[in-house]
Amino acid sequence: MNDEYVVNMKNITKVFGKVKALDHVEFSLKKGEIHAILGENGAGKSSLMNVLNGIYMPDEGQIEVKGQTVTISSPKDALDLGIGMLPQHYKLVDVFSALENVAAGSRKTTPFLNKKKILDEMGKLINQLGMDIDPNKKVYAMSVAEKQSLEIFKVLYRGADILILDEPTAVLTPQEIKNLFQIIRKMVGVGCSVIIITHKLDEVMEISDRITIMRKGTFIQTVDKKDTTPEKLAGMMVGDVMELNIPWVEVERGEKSLEVKDLIAIDKNKVAVLDHVSFDLYAGEILGVAGIAGSGQKELCEGIAGLYPIKSGEIIFDNTNIVGKNPEDISKMGISLSFVPEDRLGMGLVSSMDIIDNVLLKDYKNKKGMGISRVISRGKALALVEKLNVSTPGIENHAVSLLSGGNIQKVLLGREIELQPKLMLTAYATRGLDVRSSQIIYDLLNNEKKKMIPILYIGEDLDVLMSLCDRIVVLCEGKVTGIVDPRKTTKEAIGLLMSGVMEEGKKE
Amino acid sequence: MIHVVKKDSPKTRDTIIIRLLAILGALLAASIIVIFAGANPIELYIGIIEGCFGNLYRFAATIQKMVPLLVLSLGVMVAFKMKFWNIGAEGQFLMGAVGAALVVRYLPNLPLPVMIFAMGVLAFVFGAIWLLIPAFFKAKFGTNETLFTLMMNYIALNLVVALQYDFWKDPGASGMPKIANFPDNALLPSVSGFNLSIAFAIILVILIYFLMNYSKIGFEITVLGESENTARYIGINITKTIITAALISGGLCGLVGMFQTAGISGALSVEITGGLGFTAIIVAWLSGLKVPFIVLNSFAFAVLLQGGSYIQTAFQIPGSVAEMIQAIILFFILGSEFALHYRFISDKKKREVA
């Protein structure tokens, strides 16, 4: 490694609508270094790399690659400059062999496939990097790690010497991660520079030379690995505790309402998405769930609501084990789920229906007989729009998908509260909302808490979780790494738990 | 480079203007063919109107052409609402006709009201079964219903061929491959060309309208079509809903088999469908899967069909020309859908927007 910079990004700003995804971000990459970009979800890591890869055009700022000021307006431009990005979701043709996938779309190949020539070239590169790729193996027969190697290889074969890896370890087993790191080190050995996006502290400490920390679209700092510690990194990643105007309401907590014991759930790749999860939830309490996205929050919510298959364990509500009951029975017991997915609509609402019909979704079964009546739902919809200040041209014949994100969320949450549930599960209730709309949602939740309704609140923003919740369950890769009292702990401590660094004695 | 970009939902005014332009364009384009066929386009278009509304008999013929298309479209719509792509209406139609013919063949002496009722029930059941088979496989094993329902059409068609040319061949038809005509007690009563199926169709329109808009099952079908996740979340029994919708959809298409055999053709044959099962897909889709528009659009299609057959005789033009005119009009209307929902922009503009 020397001090020659191959990439220099200055003052990069990118705005989407009202959201500043990147706010004057600085980034530089030295030749032959492994540079980690660290940050929580929504910190702007991927956006920054998408700018470098030509997928986004920055609104402001300047990019220098290998000493030249450049405009990168497409991934093809980026590749011409030697920049290649490994997609998070692999883009390989399943029925093609490794060799055919490499050849497809490569500008080096002639219209007719010269398999032998490609094979020779592939062989050389494979030996250099110590990769385990069989050029004739079909992609559908490959493991996730093999597919990843192939993707890396594809990018290198096309002439990239600056490689961007977006969360490459998320899908790998520990052994595969080791292999990947070896490959990365060998790539550096042959003159490549590597950028790796991640939020796992231990991996950062293992693989990187320098680390850039980002938070909420801003650049925090670039540090040398040897000058820092995981604790310092976690601190920078989560930031100082922000003063939020979310009052924590003190309520004498009531009886135990929900007991989750040793919950295990397995996804279709046979990975444990919930791994011996246990916690209790009391009446009059908001129990927060913190964790990096994809740590099992969605599965936990859906598991309790009966929508995700549970392998083993117990969920005890109202003295009954509800594991194995169908969603309808569970919702009849008074458990309401309002999950706000990334696209905001997902399963709670039907996007093409108006507000009345969306209220009707939870009501229509109460009426006897074959018919449905919109009279009650209309009343509820009107009340909801008024109470929560939903801005909509009308409650009828106006699809909810045409409303703004905040208003959609108000409709969803308002409907669930209107049902007077005995247990509320909310996930990402304020995702993408502005301050005022978020405030309304927090007030709603606090009101429910005062009515001694137990609430499970899955959130993304640690500041909010810490001021709103009575206790916080921290998840990391499906495991509970700690249950903490936000008033007795620090943001850094939670950040460490989220990254899987568990300290003994933190558990309640 | 020119790009195609999706527009926001179009305004009512724009919709009407674009639709009218499409029809105008279609008539202009069709005129070229009409002139080559040696007729005066304006006279011909007036002829189409006359052929449909010129006298009571012609108007009855128009309405009779509308009925099967209307009911088939309703049937297709119920399945489409659930995003269950039933393109097997043709087959369900034929099977319904087989069901009706089965009653006539084995219980030929029933009194008329009982006969009509029994034919209707069996037609409904046969049509429903023809769609329940793919629906069952879809619900249980997740098979693709599009191909499945399409293939079921050919089984039904060839079953009718086998019946017509072999098993049920009328020995009294002096060697002609045809199935014996229905007796009078198996024909729908009619008044000056309007037969009883019109009354049934009116009842069905009202029933289906209320089913889709004001019943639990209709609501569940719609929710399931919009999002299976939401359906699961609010506790809809997905298998049951798929099966029920298939029953209604296939059953309606089957009923048309009875309307057509007992009302129009008076016998079962391979020709009775006239491809209406496929036309119904276009009608249902153009109507945005909404009952009132299905009524309007089936009427418009019936006008094209009846007008087309009238001008063949009145203007002595070949049948193929009439069909070409129909196709051109349809082509323009479908093309206008594109103009309604998309627009073209050039690369340069896009940059400015982005």
Image (cartoon, coloured by chain):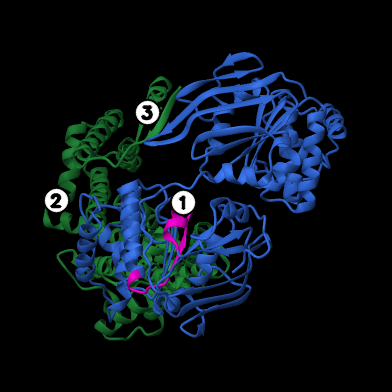
Chain colours: A blue, B green
The image position of residue A93, as x and y in percent, is 67, 42
How far is the residue under mark 2 from the one under mark 1?
A: 73 Å
Specify the farthest residue to the top: A68
> Which residue lies at the image location 57% right of the left edge and 23% below the top edge?
A9
How far is the residue under mark 1 from the one under mark 3?
A: 46 Å
> Which residue lies at the image location 37% right of the left edge and 60% below the top edge?
B81
Please give the chain letter of the residue carrying mark 1. Answer: A
Instruction: Using the image, tell me which numbered label, if any, was put on residue B344.
Output: 3
State the image quarter where residue A419 is shown.
bottom left
Give the residue type that dot 3 points to. Answer: Phe
Above or below: residue A449 compared with residue B59: below
Give the residue type that dot 1 points to. Answer: Asp
Looking at the picture, tell me which residue is in the foreground, B194 or A452. Answer: A452
Looking at the picture, tell me which residue is in the foreground, B95 or B262. Answer: B95
Please give the chain letter of the residue carrying mark 2. Answer: B
The image position of residue A396, as x and y in percent, is 22, 57
The image position of residue A55, as x and y in percent, is 54, 30
Secondary structure under the numbered disc 3 in the rendered image: strand
Secondary structure under the numbered disc 2 in the rendered image: helix
Instruction: Using the image, tell me which numbered label, if any, was put on residue B53.
Output: 2
Circle 2 or circle 1, nearest the eye: 1
Circle 1 or circle 3, nearest the eye: 1
Q: Circle 1 sits on which residue?
A: A463
User: Badges 2 and 3: C-beta atoms under 8 Å apart?
Assistant: no
> Which residue lies at the image location 54% right of the left edge and 60% below the top edge?
A297
Q: Is residue B256 visible?
A: no
Secondary structure under the numbered disc 1 in the rendered image: helix
Above or below: residue A470 compared with residue A66: below
